[in-house]
Amino acid sequence: MQLDHVTLVTPDLEGACRFFRDIVGLDEGPRPPFRVDGHWLYANGRPVIHLVDATVPAQSPGSSGPLVAPRIDHVAFRVAPGDAWRALLERLAAHRVLHQRAEVPVCAEIQLFVALAPGVVVEFVTSTAGGAAA
């Protein structure tokens, strides 16, 4: 398993994109057609920073509601397809860990999201190429 990417939710997509592109030196690249706007920034050919538009405005400090933007949304771990992925699924089932499953449009990948606590999400992602992730 390896760290795959970090997703940042921000109301300033273009500013964040410029920072990671122009200051950090990452390359902007292709991104699947999700329902919310964003950018993917690549290092060594891999999308390591996912920027997502904050679609819900942040609440002011001291308000009774949670802050929803900006934030680091989740941390993702890439798992090898096949045996490693099946072993992860078995561990999740054995420990009765609830998760959501999603398929990434265009990329032939499966994602599992586990909410550890409110606002703390861990994603596991694997390739479905050749049906290896079933």
Image: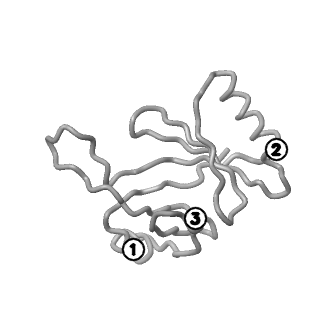
In the rendered image, residue 43, in percent from the top left (x then y), is placed at 57, 68
User: Which residue in the structure is indicated by mark 2?
Assistant: 82
Give the image quarter of residue 44: bottom right
Amino acid carrying label 2: it is Gly
> Which numbered disc, 1 or 3, marks the residue closer to the eye?
3
Looking at the rendered structure, the kind of residue marked 1 is Ile
> Which of the labelled discs sits on residue 23, or is there none?
1
- Quadrant of the image containing the N terminus: top right
Disc 3 residue type (three-letter)? Pro
Q: Residues within 10 Å of mark 3 (few under 14, many from 20)?
A: many
Q: For this view, does 13 lie left or right of residue 2? A: left
Residue occupying image coordinates x 79% and y 45%: 134
Mark 3, residue position: 47
Q: Position of residue 131 (x, y in %)?
A: 83, 52
First in sequence: mark 1 vs mark 3: 1
SS class of the residue under badge 2?
A: loop
> Residue 104 occupies which quadrant of the picture?
bottom right
Tell me the SS state at disc 3: strand
83 vs 21, left or right, is right
Q: Is residue 46 left or right of residue 121?
A: right
Q: Tag 1, which secondary structure?
A: helix
Q: Residues within 10 Å of mark 2 (few under 14, many from 20)?
A: some
Q: Residue furthest top?
A: 95
